[in-house]
Amino acid sequence: MKDWPYPFWIAHRGAGKLAPENTLAAFRVGAAHGYRAFECDVKLSADGVPFLLHDATLERTTSERGVAADRAWNELACIDAGGWHSPAFLGEPIPSLTGIAGYCLRNGFALNIEIKPTPGAEAETGRVVADEAARHWAQSETKPLLSSFRADALAAARAAQPDLPRALLLDTLCKGWLKEAQDFGCVAIVANHGVLDAAVIAQIHGAGMRVLTYTVNDPATAHWLVNCGIYGIITDAVDRFSAEDFRSI
């Protein structure tokens, strides 16, 4: 990518902790705070529909229990994914990728889709998410950034839709991490801010990729990362960091 098309500030799971994560309500709260780029987690239902959920199981963020991928989309779509957060969001449904894509496209928002496969469905999830992203954003100049911790999911996404931008997610700098990102044709690495320093950021930039980081919620860390040349920050603190200008942190 010669020109980096994504805003600097990216709202984590829609709006951080201010709304039920990975819901359309969260995206609306993030947008109300000025954010124009969002991160979300996407996995597959039992009948192959991509939908937003972080965990493999339902109990932390919905009114139900059990493995989410064991249920068909028509059942998942009826589950309350907002009441756990606060009464104001009672009845907020789990959104599909199709629903979130429509919202982002209508409003000109950028999206970082973390491919978050249920264990055992890595390749299928990577393929389906990439195919659906390519279909929804076919007429958009700014494509979603597909990221994952799972190499097999990224490989499948690349095989299915090689023209979509990809990023390797890193929680630690494991052996061969840079080569792995290069082998997958990644345009970026999205790393835990705790594993980054100026030398690592320079190394990634020298390899022709951008560096983004998660999940940064304090100004001191954000300032340091800006000075190191970071290209994007994923944050929960959408009510504390201005999305209008990274220099305003």
Image (cartoon, grey):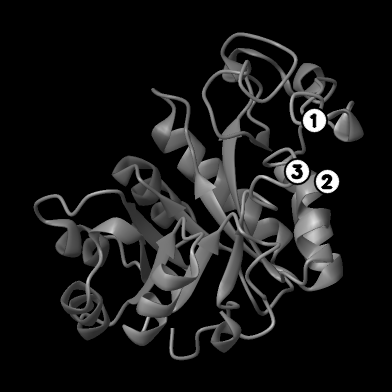
**Could you give the CA–CA distance between mark 2 and mark 3, rounded to whole angstroms?**
7 Å
Query: Can see residue 57?
Result: yes
Residue 235 position (above or below residue 25): below
Quadrant in which the N terminus appears: bottom left
| SS at circle 1 | loop
Q: Is residue 213 left or right of residue 18?
A: left
Quadrant into which the C terminus falls:
bottom right
- The kind of residue tagged 3 is Ala
Asked if the residues shown at circle 2 and circle 3 are in contact, with their CB atoms under 8 angstroms apart, the answer is yes
Q: What residue would you read off at disc 1? A: 82
Q: Would you say 33 lies left or right of 243 here?
A: right
Label ID, residue 34:
none
Residue at horizontal 22 percent and vertical 50 percent from the top: 172
Mark 1 and mark 2 in contact (Cβ < 8 Å)?
yes
Q: Decide which of 49, 108 is in the foreground and name it.
A: 108
For this rendering, which residue is in front, 232 or 147?
232
Which numbered dot is residue 25?
2
Instruction: Identify residue for label 3.
Output: 19
Residue 197: x and y in percent read 22, 71
157 displayed left or right of 55: left
Q: What residue type is labelled 2?
A: Ala
Q: Are marks 1 and 3 in contact (CB under 8 Å)?
A: yes
Q: Where is residue 37 in the image (x, y as percent from the top left)?
A: 66, 67
